[in-house]
Amino acid sequence: MASIRKVAVVTGSNKGIGFAVVRGLCKSFDGDVFLTARDEGRGQAAIADLNKEGLQPKFHQLDINDRSSIERLKSFLLSTYGGLDVLVNNAGIAYRNADPAPFAEQAEFTCKTNFWTSTWSVFGRVVSVSSVLAHTAIDQCSPAVQGRFKDPTLTMEGLEKIMQEFVDAAKAGRHLEEGFPKSAYGTSKIGKNFMTVIQDRDIRKDPREDIVINSCCPGHVQTDMSSHTGPRNIDEGADTMVYLALLPPNTTSPKGNFVADRSILQWG
Ligand SMILES: NC(=O)c1ccc[n+]([C@@H]2O[C@H](COP(=O)([O-])OP(=O)(O)OC[C@H]3O[C@@H](n4cnc5c(N)ncnc54)[C@H](OP(=O)(O)O)[C@@H]3O)[C@@H](O)[C@H]2O)c1
Protein backbone atom coordinates (compact mmCIF):
# COMPACT_ATOMS: atom_id res chain seq x y z
CA MET A 1 0.00 0.00 0.00
CA ALA A 2 1.31 3.45 -0.89
CA SER A 3 2.25 5.43 2.20
CA ILE A 4 0.32 8.63 2.89
CA ARG A 5 2.15 11.78 1.85
CA LYS A 6 3.19 14.30 4.46
CA VAL A 7 1.30 17.57 4.51
CA ALA A 8 2.00 21.14 5.63
CA VAL A 9 -0.55 23.94 6.01
CA VAL A 10 0.22 27.67 6.21
CA THR A 11 -2.63 29.88 7.39
CA GLY A 12 -3.15 33.30 5.79
CA SER A 13 -0.68 32.60 2.99
CA ASN A 14 -2.15 34.37 -0.03
CA LYS A 15 0.25 37.26 0.61
CA GLY A 16 2.94 38.58 2.91
CA ILE A 17 5.17 36.40 5.05
CA GLY A 18 2.83 33.39 4.84
CA PHE A 19 3.14 33.43 1.05
CA ALA A 20 6.94 33.33 1.39
CA VAL A 21 6.69 30.45 3.90
CA VAL A 22 4.73 28.45 1.29
CA ARG A 23 7.43 29.31 -1.25
CA GLY A 24 10.16 28.16 1.16
CA LEU A 25 8.34 24.94 2.09
CA CYS A 26 7.64 24.09 -1.56
CA LYS A 27 11.41 24.12 -2.08
CA SER A 28 12.35 22.01 0.93
CA PHE A 29 9.43 20.12 2.51
CA ASP A 30 9.08 16.48 1.54
CA GLY A 31 5.32 16.43 1.04
CA ASP A 32 2.33 18.51 -0.04
CA VAL A 33 2.25 22.19 0.93
CA PHE A 34 -1.12 23.93 1.28
CA LEU A 35 -1.43 27.63 0.65
CA THR A 36 -4.64 28.69 2.39
CA ALA A 37 -6.65 31.89 2.16
CA ARG A 38 -9.99 33.10 3.41
CA ASP A 39 -10.79 34.39 -0.09
CA GLU A 40 -10.65 31.73 -2.79
CA GLY A 41 -9.82 34.26 -5.55
CA ARG A 42 -6.87 35.76 -3.67
CA GLY A 43 -5.67 32.26 -2.84
CA GLN A 44 -5.84 31.02 -6.43
CA ALA A 45 -4.03 34.15 -7.68
CA ALA A 46 -1.22 33.43 -5.20
CA ILE A 47 -1.05 29.81 -6.37
CA ALA A 48 -0.76 31.05 -9.97
CA ASP A 49 2.14 33.33 -8.95
CA LEU A 50 4.01 30.43 -7.37
CA ASN A 51 3.25 28.19 -10.37
CA LYS A 52 5.06 30.78 -12.52
CA GLU A 53 8.13 30.15 -10.33
CA GLY A 54 7.83 26.42 -11.06
CA LEU A 55 6.41 25.64 -7.59
CA GLN A 56 3.32 23.47 -7.06
CA PRO A 57 1.56 24.32 -3.79
CA LYS A 58 -1.97 23.05 -3.30
CA PHE A 59 -4.87 25.26 -2.25
CA HIS A 60 -7.58 25.03 0.38
CA GLN A 61 -9.91 27.76 1.57
CA LEU A 62 -9.46 28.63 5.27
CA ASP A 63 -10.91 31.50 7.25
CA ILE A 64 -9.55 31.10 10.74
CA ASN A 65 -12.49 33.05 12.16
CA ASP A 66 -15.03 30.69 10.61
CA ARG A 67 -15.56 27.44 12.52
CA SER A 68 -17.18 25.67 9.55
CA SER A 69 -14.25 26.61 7.28
CA ILE A 70 -11.83 25.15 9.86
CA GLU A 71 -13.91 21.97 10.12
CA ARG A 72 -13.96 21.57 6.31
CA LEU A 73 -10.16 21.76 6.14
CA LYS A 74 -9.76 19.46 9.11
CA SER A 75 -11.98 16.71 7.67
CA PHE A 76 -10.28 17.06 4.27
CA LEU A 77 -6.85 16.62 5.89
CA LEU A 78 -7.98 13.67 7.97
CA SER A 79 -9.54 11.84 5.04
CA THR A 80 -6.73 12.60 2.58
CA TYR A 81 -3.61 12.54 4.75
CA GLY A 82 -4.74 11.02 8.03
CA GLY A 83 -3.79 14.26 9.85
CA LEU A 84 -1.35 17.13 9.55
CA ASP A 85 2.44 17.12 9.83
CA VAL A 86 3.24 20.84 9.86
CA LEU A 87 1.04 23.79 10.81
CA VAL A 88 2.34 27.34 10.37
CA ASN A 89 -0.09 29.50 12.26
CA ASN A 90 0.67 32.71 10.41
CA ALA A 91 -2.64 34.48 9.70
CA GLY A 92 -3.01 37.62 11.72
CA ILE A 93 -4.31 41.15 11.76
CA ALA A 94 -3.20 44.46 13.20
CA TYR A 95 -5.15 47.72 13.26
CA ARG A 96 -3.17 50.74 12.11
CA ASN A 97 -2.32 53.32 14.79
CA ALA A 98 -4.61 55.86 13.13
CA ASP A 99 -7.52 53.43 12.80
CA PRO A 100 -10.66 55.14 14.17
CA ALA A 101 -12.26 51.85 15.30
CA PRO A 102 -13.01 51.92 19.06
CA PHE A 103 -10.35 50.18 21.17
CA ALA A 104 -12.99 47.74 22.49
CA GLU A 105 -13.64 46.52 18.94
CA GLN A 106 -9.91 46.35 18.17
CA ALA A 107 -9.25 44.31 21.32
CA GLU A 108 -12.03 41.84 20.62
CA PHE A 109 -11.33 41.29 16.92
CA THR A 110 -7.53 41.22 17.24
CA CYS A 111 -7.62 38.68 20.06
CA LYS A 112 -10.22 36.62 18.21
CA THR A 113 -8.07 36.40 15.08
CA ASN A 114 -4.58 36.31 16.55
CA PHE A 115 -5.17 34.34 19.74
CA TRP A 116 -8.33 32.28 19.97
CA THR A 117 -8.06 30.74 16.55
CA SER A 118 -4.57 29.48 17.47
CA THR A 119 -5.80 27.34 20.32
CA TRP A 120 -6.41 24.34 18.07
CA SER A 121 -4.98 20.93 18.77
CA VAL A 122 -1.29 20.46 18.04
CA PHE A 123 0.47 18.42 15.39
CA GLY A 124 3.99 17.25 14.42
CA ARG A 125 5.55 20.68 13.95
CA VAL A 126 3.67 23.81 14.90
CA VAL A 127 5.01 27.29 14.19
CA SER A 128 3.02 29.97 15.95
CA VAL A 129 3.77 33.33 14.39
CA SER A 130 4.02 35.98 17.07
CA SER A 131 5.99 39.19 17.45
CA VAL A 132 8.61 40.80 19.67
CA LEU A 133 5.85 43.35 20.36
CA ALA A 134 4.59 40.75 22.84
CA HIS A 135 7.70 41.54 24.88
CA THR A 136 6.90 45.25 24.89
CA ALA A 137 3.31 44.47 25.85
CA ILE A 138 4.18 42.16 28.75
CA ASP A 139 6.48 44.86 30.13
CA GLN A 140 3.45 47.20 30.12
CA CYS A 141 1.37 44.78 32.24
CA SER A 142 1.05 45.40 35.99
CA PRO A 143 3.12 43.05 38.20
CA ALA A 144 -0.12 41.25 39.13
CA VAL A 145 -1.12 40.60 35.51
CA GLN A 146 2.45 39.60 34.62
CA GLY A 147 2.42 37.17 37.51
CA ARG A 148 -0.78 35.56 36.25
CA PHE A 149 0.59 35.11 32.72
CA LYS A 150 3.90 33.75 34.02
CA ASP A 151 2.39 31.34 36.56
CA PRO A 152 4.06 27.98 35.75
CA THR A 153 0.80 26.19 36.58
CA LEU A 154 -1.26 28.29 34.12
CA THR A 155 -3.52 26.11 31.93
CA MET A 156 -5.02 26.89 28.50
CA GLU A 157 -8.33 27.44 30.25
CA GLY A 158 -6.67 29.91 32.62
CA LEU A 159 -4.92 31.70 29.75
CA GLU A 160 -8.19 32.03 27.81
CA LYS A 161 -9.77 33.48 30.95
CA ILE A 162 -7.07 36.17 31.22
CA MET A 163 -7.44 37.01 27.52
CA GLN A 164 -11.21 37.29 27.91
CA GLU A 165 -10.69 39.57 30.92
CA PHE A 166 -8.57 41.83 28.71
CA VAL A 167 -11.30 42.01 26.07
CA ASP A 168 -13.99 42.65 28.69
CA ALA A 169 -11.86 45.32 30.36
CA ALA A 170 -11.26 46.97 26.97
CA LYS A 171 -15.01 47.02 26.35
CA ALA A 172 -15.50 48.71 29.70
CA GLY A 173 -12.66 51.17 28.97
CA ARG A 174 -10.78 49.80 32.01
CA HIS A 175 -7.94 47.72 30.51
CA LEU A 176 -5.21 50.11 31.70
CA GLU A 177 -6.65 50.34 35.24
CA GLU A 178 -6.82 46.55 35.33
CA GLY A 179 -3.13 46.27 34.50
CA PHE A 180 -3.33 45.30 30.82
CA PRO A 181 -1.24 46.86 28.01
CA LYS A 182 -2.47 49.60 25.70
CA SER A 183 -1.86 47.48 22.59
CA ALA A 184 -4.51 44.99 21.42
CA TYR A 185 -2.02 43.49 18.95
CA GLY A 186 0.70 43.14 21.61
CA THR A 187 -1.73 41.52 24.03
CA SER A 188 -2.94 39.04 21.40
CA LYS A 189 0.69 38.03 20.84
CA ILE A 190 1.35 37.70 24.59
CA GLY A 191 -1.47 35.17 24.51
CA LYS A 192 0.05 33.37 21.56
CA ASN A 193 3.46 33.11 23.25
CA PHE A 194 2.10 31.74 26.53
CA MET A 195 -0.12 29.35 24.60
CA THR A 196 3.07 27.87 23.12
CA VAL A 197 4.59 27.52 26.59
CA ILE A 198 1.47 25.78 27.94
CA GLN A 199 0.99 23.48 24.93
CA ASP A 200 4.66 22.48 25.12
CA ARG A 201 4.27 21.67 28.82
CA ASP A 202 1.24 19.51 28.04
CA ILE A 203 2.97 17.75 25.13
CA ARG A 204 5.92 16.79 27.32
CA LYS A 205 3.56 14.83 29.61
CA ASP A 206 3.11 12.36 26.73
CA PRO A 207 6.51 11.87 25.05
CA ARG A 208 5.23 9.16 22.67
CA GLU A 209 4.53 11.65 19.90
CA ASP A 210 7.27 13.73 18.28
CA ILE A 211 5.51 17.08 18.52
CA VAL A 212 7.47 20.34 18.56
CA ILE A 213 5.73 23.68 18.99
CA ASN A 214 7.50 27.03 18.96
CA SER A 215 6.45 30.64 18.60
CA CYS A 216 8.53 33.11 16.64
CA CYS A 217 8.99 36.63 15.35
CA PRO A 218 9.75 37.15 11.65
CA GLY A 219 11.35 40.55 12.31
CA HIS A 220 10.16 43.82 10.78
CA VAL A 221 9.01 42.78 7.31
CA GLN A 222 7.71 44.78 4.33
CA THR A 223 4.11 43.64 4.04
CA ASP A 224 0.66 45.20 3.95
CA MET A 225 0.52 44.80 7.74
CA SER A 226 3.64 46.92 8.24
CA SER A 227 2.60 49.37 5.48
CA HIS A 228 5.67 48.07 3.62
CA THR A 229 8.12 49.48 6.14
CA GLY A 230 10.99 47.56 7.71
CA PRO A 231 14.30 46.21 6.50
CA ARG A 232 13.26 42.67 5.56
CA ASN A 233 11.62 41.24 2.48
CA ILE A 234 9.07 38.45 2.92
CA ASP A 235 11.56 35.64 2.22
CA GLU A 236 13.90 36.96 4.92
CA GLY A 237 10.90 37.19 7.27
CA ALA A 238 9.88 33.63 6.44
CA ASP A 239 13.34 32.16 7.10
CA THR A 240 12.90 31.36 10.81
CA MET A 241 9.37 30.05 10.20
CA VAL A 242 10.53 27.63 7.51
CA TYR A 243 13.44 26.57 9.72
CA LEU A 244 11.05 25.80 12.61
CA ALA A 245 8.58 24.00 10.33
CA LEU A 246 11.36 21.66 9.14
CA LEU A 247 12.94 20.79 12.50
CA PRO A 248 14.12 17.17 12.24
CA PRO A 249 12.73 14.16 14.12
CA ASN A 250 13.25 14.11 17.90
CA THR A 251 14.23 17.76 18.13
CA THR A 252 14.78 18.80 21.75
CA SER A 253 15.69 22.44 21.09
CA PRO A 254 14.13 24.77 20.14
CA LYS A 255 11.01 23.30 21.71
CA GLY A 256 8.36 25.37 23.47
CA ASN A 257 10.49 28.46 22.82
CA PHE A 258 10.19 31.91 21.33
CA VAL A 259 12.55 32.09 18.36
CA ALA A 260 13.85 34.96 16.23
CA ASP A 261 16.61 34.78 13.63
CA ARG A 262 16.80 31.02 14.31
CA SER A 263 17.84 31.72 17.93
CA ILE A 264 15.92 31.24 21.16
CA LEU A 265 14.97 34.49 22.90
CA GLN A 266 14.17 34.29 26.58
CA TRP A 267 10.51 34.98 27.09
CA GLY A 268 8.11 35.37 30.00
N1 LIG B 1 5.10 42.32 8.93
C1 LIG B 1 5.78 42.39 10.06
O1 LIG B 1 6.69 43.22 10.24
C2 LIG B 1 5.46 41.43 11.20
C3 LIG B 1 6.23 41.53 12.37
C4 LIG B 1 5.98 40.64 13.42
C5 LIG B 1 5.01 39.66 13.28
N2 LIG B 1 4.26 39.60 12.13
C6 LIG B 1 3.24 38.53 12.05
O2 LIG B 1 3.43 37.79 10.85
C7 LIG B 1 2.18 37.23 10.41
C8 LIG B 1 1.95 37.59 8.93
O3 LIG B 1 1.90 39.00 8.83
P1 LIG B 1 2.14 39.78 7.47
O4 LIG B 1 3.01 40.93 7.81
O5 LIG B 1 2.53 38.85 6.39
O6 LIG B 1 0.66 40.37 7.23
P2 LIG B 1 -0.21 40.57 5.91
O7 LIG B 1 0.63 40.84 4.73
O8 LIG B 1 -1.26 41.54 6.32
O9 LIG B 1 -0.88 39.13 5.70
C9 LIG B 1 -1.76 38.61 6.65
C10 LIG B 1 -2.37 37.35 6.09
O10 LIG B 1 -3.32 36.86 7.07
C11 LIG B 1 -4.54 36.64 6.39
N3 LIG B 1 -5.69 36.68 7.29
C12 LIG B 1 -6.13 37.70 8.08
N4 LIG B 1 -7.26 37.33 8.71
C13 LIG B 1 -7.53 36.05 8.32
C14 LIG B 1 -8.54 35.13 8.59
N5 LIG B 1 -9.57 35.43 9.42
N6 LIG B 1 -8.50 33.90 8.04
C15 LIG B 1 -7.49 33.56 7.21
N7 LIG B 1 -6.50 34.41 6.87
C16 LIG B 1 -6.53 35.64 7.41
C17 LIG B 1 -4.59 37.71 5.32
O11 LIG B 1 -5.57 37.39 4.34
P3 LIG B 1 -6.33 38.55 3.46
O12 LIG B 1 -5.44 38.85 2.29
O13 LIG B 1 -7.61 37.88 3.10
O14 LIG B 1 -6.51 39.74 4.36
C18 LIG B 1 -3.17 37.60 4.80
O15 LIG B 1 -3.03 36.51 3.93
C19 LIG B 1 1.10 37.84 11.35
O16 LIG B 1 0.78 36.88 12.35
C20 LIG B 1 1.81 39.04 11.97
O17 LIG B 1 1.29 39.37 13.23
C21 LIG B 1 4.47 40.45 11.09
Image (tube, helix red, strand yellow):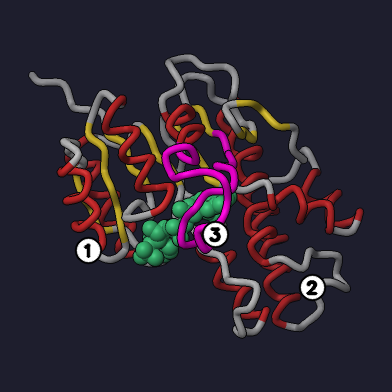
Judged from this view, the residue extending furthest toward the right is 143
Secondary structure mostly seen in magenta is: loop
Q: Is residue 56 left or right of residue 165?
A: left
Quadrant where the C terminus lies? Answer: top right
Badge 2 local density, few (<14 within 10 Å), some, or many (20+)? many
**Image position, residue 264 (x, y; %):** 66, 27
**Image position, residue 26 (x, y; %):** 27, 33
Query: Would the CB of label 3 be found within 8 Å of ligand 1?
Result: yes
**Image position, residue 81 (x, y; %):** 21, 35
**Image position, residue 172 (x, y; %):** 75, 83
Earlier sequence position, callout 3 versus callout 1: 1
Residue 40, disc: 1
Badge 3 local density, few (<14 within 10 Å), some, or many (20+)? few
The reply to whether dot 2 and dot 3 touch (C-beta < 8 Å) is no
Q: Which residue is under mark 2?
A: 175
State the count of labels.
Answer: 3
Look at the numbered disc 2 and give the secondary structure of its residue.
loop
Q: Residue at x 59, y 23 (%)?
A: 254
Range drawn in magenta: 214-238
Tell me which corner region of the image, top left, top right, bottom left or bottom right, holds residue 14. bottom left
Look at the numbered disc 1 and give the secondary structure of its residue.
helix
Magenta highlight on residue 263: no
Judged from this view, the residue extending furthest toward the left is 1
Circle 3: residue type: Ser
Residue 268, disc: none
Earlier sequence position, callout 1 versus callout 2: 1
